[in-house]
Image (cartoon, rainbow, N blue to C red):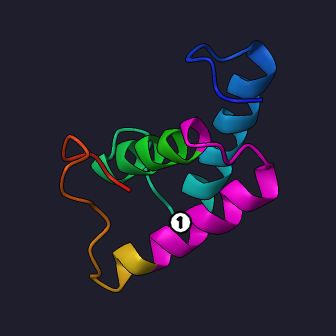
């Protein structure tokens, strides 16, 4: 089912759990810009149709590795938000 723009409590819980787990594994503080970017990236994935938790986690991990290697994690034309 396409994303309607409104998260159900279950969807929000899944995304929050994924983000919290990712940030613990990569030692990102709750106030860091990196956590905010990871959250934005996670939402971008979800709103573009990736709703499977395993796929979200794997894609977020690849994104994080690229960020740590200094590779671009932002795409021009998407409001300057992280991808």
Placement of 79 over or under 28, stated as above or below: above
Residue 18 position in % (x across, y down): 68, 46
Residue 38 position in % (x across, y down): 45, 51
Residue 30 position in % (x across, y down): 44, 40
Which residue position holds label 1?
26
Placement of 46 over or under 8, stated as above or below: below
The residue that appears at 48% across and 69% down in the rendered structure is 63
Report whether 6 appears left or right of 1: left
**Near-viewer residue (28 or 57):** 57
Q: Secondary structure at mark 1?
A: loop
Report whether 2 appears left or right of 32: right
Is most of the magenta stretch helix, strand or loop? helix
Quarter that holds the C terminus:
bottom left
Is-magenta flag for residue 51?
yes
Report whether 8 appears left or right of 30: right
Quarter that holds the N terminus:
top right
Report whether 69 appears left or right of 16: left
Residues in magenta, as a range: 46-65
Is-magenta flag for residue 11?
no
Residue 34 position in % (x across, y down): 35, 54
The residue that appears at 61% across and 65% down in the rendered structure is 59
Q: Residue furthest bottom?
A: 69
Placement of 53 over or under 7, stated as above or below: below
Q: In terms of image quadrants, where is residue 40?
A: top left
Q: In terms of image quadrants, where is residue 28?
A: bottom left
**Near-viewer residue (44 or 30):** 44
The residue that appears at 57% across and 62% down in the rendered structure is 60
How packed mark 1 is, by other alpha carbons closer than 10 Å (few <14, some 14-19, many 20 or more), is some
The residue that appears at 67% across and 36% down in the rendered structure is 15
């Amino acid at each position: 089912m396409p994303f309607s723009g409104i998260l159900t409590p279950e969807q929000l819980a899944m995304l929050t759990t994924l983000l919290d787990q990712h940030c613990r594994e990569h030692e990102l503080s709750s106030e860091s810009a990196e956590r905010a970017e990871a959250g934005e990236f996670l939402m971008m994935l979800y709103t573009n149709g990736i709703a499977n938790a395993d796929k979200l986690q794997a894609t977020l991990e690849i994104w994080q590795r690229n960020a740590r290697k200094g590779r671009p994690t932002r795409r021009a034309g998407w409001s300057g938000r992280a991808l």
